[in-house]
Amino acid sequence: MVSSDPILRLEGVVKKFGAFTALHGVDLEIREGEFFTIVGPSGSGKSTMIRLLVGMDEVTDGAIWLRDQRIEAMPANLRPTCMVFQSLALFPHMSVGQNIEFPLKLRKVASSARKERALELLDLLRLPRDYYDKRISQCSGGEKQRVALARALAFDPEILFFDEPLSALDYRLRKTLEKELKNLHQRTGKTFVYITHSLEEAMVMSDRIAIMKAGHFEQIAVADEIYGRPVSRFVAEFMGEVNLFEVTSRDGTTLESPCLTVKSGTTNESLPAGGNGLLMVRPEFIRFCGEDESPDYRIKGRLLEEYALGSRIQYEVETETGQILTVEKLRQDRASSGDIGSEVMLGFDAARTHLIKDT
Amino acid sequence: MPASRSTRIVLFVYGLLVIGLLYLPLVSVGFASVSRARYLSFPIKKYSSKWYAEALASGTVRDLLWTSLSVAVIVTILSVIIAFFGALAFARYEWRYRTTFQKLILLPIFFPQTVLGLALLMWFNSLGVIPSWKTAVVAHLVWIAPIATLIVAIRAYSFDPALEEAARDMGASTPTILKEITLPLLMPGLISAGLFAFLLSWGNFPLSLFATGADSTLPEWLYAKMVSGYSPLVPTLGIMSVVASLFLILAAFAIAWLVQTIRDSKAAQ
Amino acid sequence: MQQLNQKLGYLSALPMLAVFAIALFAPLVVVVLFSIMPSKVFSLANMPDFSAYSVFFSQGYYKSLIWSLGMALASTVILLVISWPLAYGMAKVFRKFTLVLTIAVVMSLFVSENIRLFGWVLTLMKGGLIEGHIRAWTGVGFDSPLYGVPIIIFGLVYVYLPFMLFPLAQGISMVPDDARQAAADLGATRWQIFRQIDVPLAAPGIVVGCLLSFVLAAGAVAESKILGGQAVITITDDIETAFTFGQDWPLGSSLSVILIVIIGTLALFGISRVDLDQIMGRKR
């Protein structure tokens, strides 16, 4: 359903608040029908970004294109896009039905047609039809989410924006709604642009993810790429635990770090002579090796700590050179480790490593 | 650190005592209003409602009430309109001089009312305007509209600005947002502001004293009679004025309760 | 959006500002202009001579001002002491009773101040509610406490109680419970909690409450006239007399200007120190 034509295009978008620059000349293309997520820590500029995209703030410089129309100067109420707010912004003085019909009422749609559409949307979001007359204050957290979605869909926007709408919910409800959102995206075929600080949330739902840091995009890619082939330490560390070896290439053929030497070319990429980089191994790709196993690389260490994370167990291992490595195992594979304080041998394969250049 | 039981009781008794002292003078006025004697002295020997009958029959009293009522009603309407917009400028819109405006709003509240009344008198005189109950409306407004604004502002602070942004995002223009979102959400604040405005205008005398010219409001007349030439009608009219205020407050509460009940029963269906 | 907010801000402030312009600032300018006119003129078309200000000292008007400010100060201090426990109760101890107290105190505000003061006269006068009944029961009467400085201060305390009580209660409610609990947990005594936690955190409420009571009491007149029987003359009383019996507008104006400058300086100093957004509970 995702076409390759961009529906939304940003060119050199700059946003300044007084002396502070929130966005430093950002370029971006979002494709028609895709689920695009912008992820970043607080203060990275993602909220500023979405306010510019929906028209609640003005750009300082640059252009925003919706298909072939320039929209950066168009006020929010004239743009054919709509946002689901972090606080949901449901009108407390209106019923569920009145909330959903609000955008239609603004367009002077006849009341019978409005009601019909509102009921359809209640069906689409799996809310009972008799919720039509309910008051907002009588709805639960999850129901409010669905009403807010229904209202945004009633607007029938070209692009539907989401400003961290799930951040206030408890873990289980959030997980359910993430899946529902993904499902809704597939059923409606609309372009979704989603903002969150949780990369985990982004991974579940998105076609593509943009990682934001200090007012620019660090990396824009599909989820697997972000997880497995991050372009920087920031992106690598953004998603959970990671092991990074600071490596130097002395002659262009080997990568050296205090506890590890890797032949260049056995990793996916190589460094020029004198270049620095980070060699990344995710914790689940490191294993405890017995004598009989022969991984590509071996590191000797001492087991420091063991943490139970539910389905997984996490270990901290200190190498002989003092670097702390993180190893994760599924609970059923627990037996392979030794006692706390004992000597262990760690191993991983070249195919599971990734080289980040120019740290 | 929850207060101990004894602290709780002591404070509660203290609170009751303060309420008692606040209303004690009105008890005296109440007794005085039903005393038959022309010159009051306690304990009251004979009770009578003749002063009430006299007050109700008096043309002067009717004029006083009419003037007070006209001023209060007009002040209420204007104050609520000014306060609606004023509260948005005070609490809602991010504009350059917002904090200055907030401080400006407090100024008339700090101002000695008698001095303000006299200043207005000189100003009207310089303009060649003859003071009447209409100029009193202006005088009341400069003191009451800021108070009404503060009351509405408290309400404006408590609602999420995202509601207005959401409406705008869905295509609503500024007037539509004001009518469909802002006005209904501020309504409880506007109603209490209106109630305050009416009651404060109804009871005010320092501003009326100099701004009404030949017309006289009820508190003004009472003051004149208290300071010189006592009339047995003073306690009677005082009580009537208090009862009128009380009636209005009860009516407001009753209406609020009724609206709530109707809404709840509708929602329950 | 910022631009729209700017525009809407200016527009919606406009009605209020218009009222201020015609009913606050213009009269103030007139007062200032009249205050520099020669004695007993009724028009601004005269040569200014500032003579009205010299009268302030030569004819002893400064005494009235000192009385007014002194009594205002006394009533403010008394109000702070007697309101604190009640405000504390309203903010931290009572539940439903807070609402009852609030309604009771607010409703008393709606009764014209002079009716309530007159009620005190009826209560406290010889042959009034208290003395009359005591004499009837015991046969022993006593002199009325009316017509003196203490009763004027009592009147000020009585009338301006709400203006101290509500800001104080608001201020105290801003003191987080866990801060007090943490202090107690760390071994602070009640007095230390009061000094180190309550007072600093409730400071905005204390400032607003003291400022309001002091300023309103300094400009008060009815208390001294009705309860005090003019035992002392307040500055506002002098201003009123200059305008009415004295028919000397420049004198009244100059006294007004002096009072306004004192009150205005205090008010601006106090107001500039508090964050209204915070006190009134702004979100975001």
Image: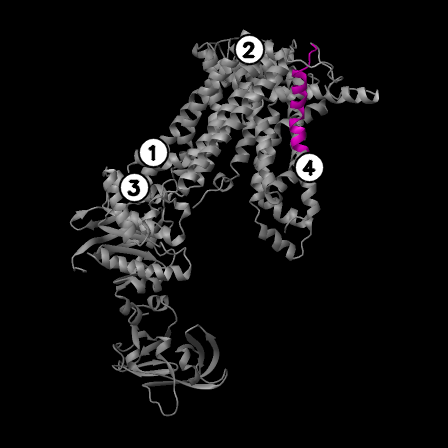
Q: Taking the image as drawn, is residue C67 in sight? A: no
The residue tagged 1 is B179
Identify residue type, mark 4: Tyr
- The image quadrant that residue A235 belongs to is bottom left
In this rendered view, identify the residue nearer to me: C248 or C283: C283
The residue tagged 4 is B14
**Chain of the residue that carries numbered disc 3 in the rendered image:** A
Task: Determine if the magenta segment contains residue A178.
Answer: no
The residue tagged 2 is B61
Q: Are marks 2 and 4 on the same chain?
A: yes
User: Horizontal and vertical percent for residue B267?
Assistant: 40, 41
In this rendered view, identify the residue nearer to me: A233 or C187: C187
Which range of residues does the magenta coloring cover? B17-37
- Name which of mark 2 and mark 1 comes first in the sequence: 2
Contact between marks 3 and 2 (CB within 8 A): the answer is no
Q: Which mark is residue A102?
A: 3
Instruction: Calculate the distance from the C-alpha at mark 4 to the C-alpha at mark 3.
Output: 52 Å
